[in-house]
Amino acid sequence: TDPVAVVALLKEAGAPMQVRTLIEGESLLNDASAFVLFEVLLEVMNPTVQTPSVLSALTHCARLSVGGVAVGVAFGVLCALLLSCTNDTVTEISIALFGMYLGYYIAQSMGYSGVLSVVIFGLMMCALGASYISPTSLEPKHRFMEQLGFTANTVIFMYSGLIVAYFALKFGSRLTTYDYIYAIVWYLILNCIRALGLFVLSP
């Protein structure tokens, strides 16, 4: 499911903020976990290196996850401390952007998961940094981050659609009926898993 469209519909329906936040958070953790698995599989499928064992693949997955979490926590604490030193709106927004982008870059350069570090950074900012944001900065910050997220999602989905269309036109003749059935079955399975996760995590 597309969390952007779902959250927009929930806003129109007047759903509680807690439900919208739960769906967005679940989507972020799903994306981060999928990206970690993608990086592991990318290393497994690399033809220039020897195929790693199951243990080494699991170790690599753990290193990506633990390292990404550690970097996210470190930058979350650092930015929370920086926020406690200022009441300027522009500075507070700049600190948040600094934490997101620099944390991602450092995590990736160290061989960890940059995407997971950004997700954990956001959680840490909600837990620690939110109390240090001045009341006059809350509304501008929320509007800026909402616009930034909407723009990023729009660009990502447009780019993804173009890539899918390109590969469909280029390799569509190689697909069989089994491939389409396989894709539909996995789509249904993944949606059931997400529904189960939302049910378990719902208050």
Image (spheres, grey):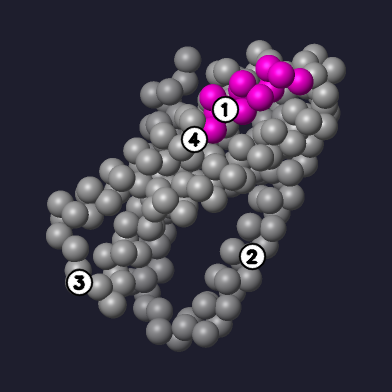
- Range shown magenta: 75-86
Residue at x 35% of width, y 64% of height: 42
Asked if residue 150 lies left or right of residue 71, the reply is right
Residue 112, relative to residue 139: is it above or below?
below
Compare residues 30 and 46 and report the one nearer the observer: 46
* CA distance separating discs 2 and 4: 27 Å
Could you tell me how many numbered marks the image carries? 4
Lower sequence index among marks 2 and 1: 1
Q: Which residue is mark 3?
A: 50
Question: Is residue 54 positioned above or below 49 on the image?
Answer: above
Q: Which residue corresponds to mark 2? A: 159
Mark 3 and mark 4: span between their CA atoms? Answer: 31 Å
**Numbered disc 1: secondary structure:** helix
* Real-space CA distance between mark 3 and mark 1, rounded to the nearest whole angstrom: 39 Å
Q: Position of residue 183 (x, y in %)?
A: 40, 62
- What x and y, as percent, mark residue 188? 40, 49
Q: Amino acid at mark 2?
A: Tyr
Q: Helix or strand or loop: what does disc 4 sit on?
A: helix
Q: Quadrant for residue 132, please give it.
A: top right
Lower position in the chain sequence, tag 2 or tag 3: 3
